Image: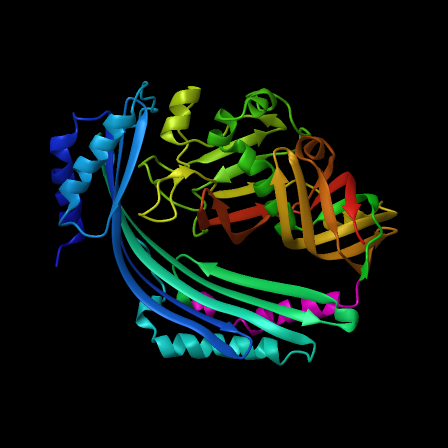
Amino acid sequence: MVTSLSLQDRLLDTIAPYRDRVDYLEIRLEQGESTSISYRGQKLDAVDRSFSLAGNVRACHKGGWSFVTFNGLADLQDRIEEAIAQASLIGKEITQLASIEPIQDYVSVELHQDPRGISLDAKRQLIETYNQILLEFDPRIQTTMVGYGDRFRTTYFVNSLGSSIAQERLDVNGRFGVVARGEGNVVRQGFESVHSRSDYGVLQGLEEQVRSAAERAVRQLNAKPVKGGQYPVVLDPYLSGVFIHEAFGHLSEADFVYENPRMQELLVMGKPIAIPQLNVVDDATLPGLPGSLKYDDEGVPAQRKYLIKDGILTQRLHSRETAGKMHEAPTGNARALGATYPPIVRMTNTGIESGDCTFEEMIGDIEEGVYAVRMLGGQTNGEMFTFAAAEGYMIRDGKIAEPVSDVTLSGNVFQTLKDIAAIGRDSVYKNGGCGKGGQSPLPVSVGGPHVRIQNVVVGGR
């Protein structure tokens, strides 16, 4: 069996003779093992246990990129030749990559309870127990969507600059969803999820958290549609995190900015774009979160970046190529879903920093407003956004009042950032998955405190 260290050395030895034939060359190899279990209603929908080895060669010459995948080391030299030939064929300009120092490192996972030591049947029984809790909660529960997943992988990365990096990664997650149906065929959903980068134990003892997904779905069956109009709106921490990720985080990804002249005009570094109290970060260095990493998939060290600092646009997210083309520093945000995908500019853990307002202070002077909780779905189009909240409540005379349904929030992100009226003290991060460029779901997390926004257009029925 080939040891991890010797595999790094072997890849470095393999790439060495080709370093001078193109402007840039890299190899990424991934060994992994994973388990997934899912229930849909009473039915055990899928059980999968898999082992994988796959990789890619990426080359750049005169600005032209090639990307060639492989699933075994026997033909690696042929794949390198293929990648070099393709890049040389299409390259017509100048390669612009931000410079980085070569790195040699091995990043291991500190495990608590390793899911690889738990039997498949024990995992299935645990998930079945949670599924039954949801099914038996209320007769109005129509179906469930319950899933378990674990994945341990080691990614090896070498490039023509001399970098040699191996990174271990574990992801353990549980997903618990229900659909409830009430009178008049009203349908509501509830979701909960958990995630850990080190411990199968995160899945144990979740009975109350799982049950809360069903409670929320059933509670919303009695909610009346909100009356459409403009309201002061308070977002809960999860929804404020999703908002900043979707409506602003994607605008901060430099590949989007570089290809969009309008966004280049709107997103000028040093420009005030929000209230002075707003600070937005993308932080890959936070311990244990889904988007956390030590090095990105181009071998660039992970960082904490202020996208907005004191209301001013201060940084954006880069790959080495976008950083080189825009004459900015690389940020460690080139990420790939796996070894058969090329790295593209992606977020890590993106959130709003805490402010100084309590929740009671935030709602205390609102005569009539809306409290929006969690996200059901949404879309963005440039600077315009529309989000549907999973739950909603009216705020009346400074108090949380009756539940309301069909709460959709829409607006212009740049105007909304200026309409923020209060930022809470209670920032938390939630796990999630992000989609872009056909790569989904990439592990990320979103964070924020409660946030109050004035004059939000709220749509109902």
Frontmost residue, 156 versus 286: 156
Residue ranking furthest to the front: 89
The residue range painted magenta reads 201-223
Q: Colour mode?
A: rainbow
Using residue 244 as the reference point, say whether residue 98 is left or right of it. Answer: left
Q: Residue at x 50, y 48 (%)?
A: 434
- Image x and y of residue 166, in percent: 25, 46
- Image x and y of residue 345, in percent: 43, 36
Asked if the stretch drawn in magenta spans residue 203, the answer is yes
Q: Residue at x 71, y 66 (%)?
A: 187
Where's the N terminus, which quadrant? Answer: bottom left
Q: Residue at x 58, y 72 (%)?
A: 144
Q: Quick check: 154 above or below 295?
A: below
Q: Quick check: 16 above or below 173?
A: above
Where's the C terminus, which quadrant? Answer: bottom right
Q: Main secondary structure of the magenta part?
A: helix
Using residue 305 as the reference point, say whether residue 296 is left or right of it. Answer: left
The answer to whether residue 353 is seen in the rendering is no
Using residue 417 as the reference point, say whether residue 369 is left or right of it. Answer: right
Frontmost residue, 185 versus 395: 185
Frontmost residue, 308 versus 334: 334
- Image x and y of residue 428, in percent: 58, 50
The answer to whether residue 290 is seen in the rendering is yes
Asked if the stretch drawn in magenta spans residue 158, the answer is no
Looking at the rendered structure, the number of numbered marks drawn on it comes to 0
- Image x and y of residue 236, in percent: 68, 51
Q: Quick check: 267 above or below 343?
A: above
